[in-house]
Amino acid sequence: MIEILTERLTLRPLTTDDLEWISAFRGDADVMRYIGSTGPMTPDQSRERLDRYVACWAERGLGMFGVRELDQDAPIGWAGLQPLDGTEEIEVGYAFGKAAWGRGIATEAASAVMRWGFRSLALERIVAVAYPENDASRRVMQKLGMRHEAMRLVHGVESVYYSVTALDFEKHASSANMPLS
Ligand SMILES: CC(C)(COP(=O)(O)OP(=O)(O)OC[C@H]1O[C@@H](n2cnc3c(N)ncnc32)[C@H](O)[C@@H]1OP(=O)(O)O)[C@@H](O)C(=O)NCCC(=O)NCCS
């Protein structure tokens, strides 16, 4: 199984073993405020979503990782790559429990995932979407070297749509001294 290590984090593909913590995080209104359109999820909805993540790994060879701090067993959130809402584009996504916010964790995890996508999967471009009012996520996208391109309807929600090419990401990563694995 692939494992990505960064300065502070270890990332491993989500499996069915991750149901308990992911249900707790997906049931948290603060974590879910700007994710999808359902709000906090019930345990059944979380199970169904986790099944989709696991299937994505099996079918596409990419997906969401559980993210842990190096010296901790308990996951602090998830980050990874997945097809964007029925398109051929690959989006980067991330979400963390509140205790992890404000420490650069999302940027560190997402940049490592994107470097893996560009270098190991040879992706040419990665996109990201967010609710327009999700300023923290938009700031993460900027710090990842992504540019706002347009508005897009994603899962029925009018969303900001950012993208970056492999070349621009590598340039940005070296100029911004981005934390990579
Ligand atoms: C969005 C989220 C992933 C950010 O995680 P994080 O680990 O705190 O992100 P980072 O620390 O790497 O970067 C956050 C940046 O946004 C800034 N920020 C945080 N809250 C902000 C706000 N309300 N307005 C503007 N900027 C904000 C931070 O200052 C930081 O920028 P800086 O490094 O220039 O100071 C986290 O808040 C989260 O998990 N939210 C719930 C799930 C979610 O919304 N996921 C994204 C869906 S698109």
Image: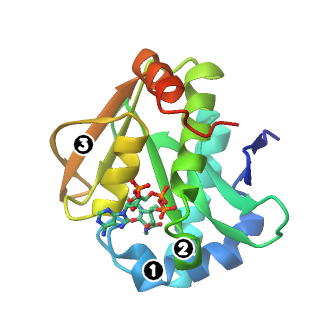
Q: CA distance from mark 3 to mark 1?
A: 24 Å
The location of residue 181, given as percent across then percent down, is 70, 37
The location of residue 7, given as percent across then percent down, is 73, 47
Give me the disc on residue 161: 3
Above or below 3: residue 17? below
Q: Residue at x 28, y 63 (%)?
A: 134
Please state if 151 lies on the left or on the right of 43 as rendered: left
Marks 3 and 2: CB-CB under 8 Å?
A: no
Marks 1 and 2: CB-CB under 8 Å?
A: yes
Q: Amino acid at mark 3?
A: Tyr
Above or below 57: residue 45? below
Task: Name the quadrant where ligand 1 sits.
Answer: bottom left
Q: Residue at x 56, y 53 (%)?
A: 79
The residue beneath circle 1 is 41
Q: Residue at x 51, y 70 (%)?
A: 101
Residue closest to the eye, 86 or 64: 64
Q: Quadrant of residue 32?
A: bottom left
Q: CA distance from mark 1 to mark 2?
A: 6 Å
Identify the mark nearer the N-term, 3 or 2.
Answer: 2
Identify the mark nearer the N-term, 1 or 2.
Answer: 1
